[in-house]
Image (cartoon, rainbow, N blue to C red):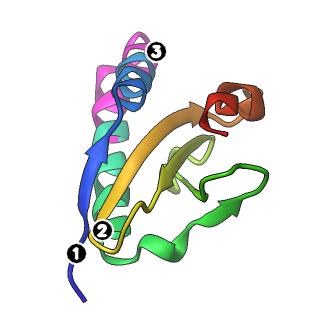
Amino acid sequence: MTRRAVARTATAESDIREIFAFIGSNSRKSAQKFNDDLAATLERLREFPHSGYKVAGYNRPLLAVRASSRFRRYIVIYRLPDDDSLVLMRVLYGARHIASLIADMR
């Protein structure tokens, strides 16, 4: 099995910067751990892209996983447009109203 290429939307990049800044305002070390954990999660998804759970109610199939066991409250939302790639759509804090934040992905 080949590992998928990972692309990030501009919105996902913005999400990651905002989360890093928020966590970093309390602890730069924790913010770096978030980035490291997220990178490990994306690496795992490259090999096991279907390990996420399906997000229902959207025209294009979306999947989601926790950012990591340490940062369980953050949700990684992605899609698999073909057999060779994975697109990181959003990274969101789980207590937010996620349905409204991803409504434009319908």
Tell whether 57 sits left or right of 41. right
Residue 77 place in picture, x, y as percent: 54, 47
Regarding mark 2 in the picture, which secondary structure is present there? helix
Residue span colored magenta: 21-33
**The stretch drawn in magenta includes residue 70:** no
- Residue on which disc 1 sits: 3
Identified by mark 1, the residue type is Arg
Q: Amino acid at mark 3?
A: Phe
Residue in the image at 34% along x and 74% along y: 83
Give the spatial CA distance, label 2 vs label 3: 27 Å
**Residue 41 sits in which quadrant?**
bottom left
Which residue is at 77% across, 56% downward? 56
Name the amino acid type tagged 2. Answer: Arg
Asked if residue 18 is positioned above or below residue 61 in the image, the reply reads above
Q: Position of residue 16 (x, y in %)?
A: 38, 28
- Foreground pick, 29 / 94: 94
Q: Say which residue label 2 marks.
A: 46
Q: Residues within 10 Å of mark 2 (few under 14, many from 20)?
A: some
Instruction: Give the foreground label among 1 and 3.
Output: 1
Query: In percent of the image, x 27 and y 47: which residue is there?
Result: 7
Label of residue 22 in the image: 3
Could you give the CA–CA distance between mark 2 and mark 1, rounded to whole angstroms? 5 Å
Task: Assess whether mark 3 and mark 1 are in contact (beta carbons under 8 angstroms).
Answer: no
**Which of the two discs, 1 and 3, labels the residue nearer the N terminus?**
1
Q: Nearer the viewer, residue 69 or 63?
A: 63
Determine contact: label 2, label 3, CB under 8 Å: no
- Asked which secondary structure carries label 1, the reply is loop
Mark 3 Cα shell of 10 Å, populated few (<14), some (14-19), many (≥20) = few
Q: Secondary structure at mark 3?
A: helix
> Which tag, 2 or 1, sits closer to the chain's start?
1
The image shows residue 14 at horizontal and vertical percentages of: 38, 20
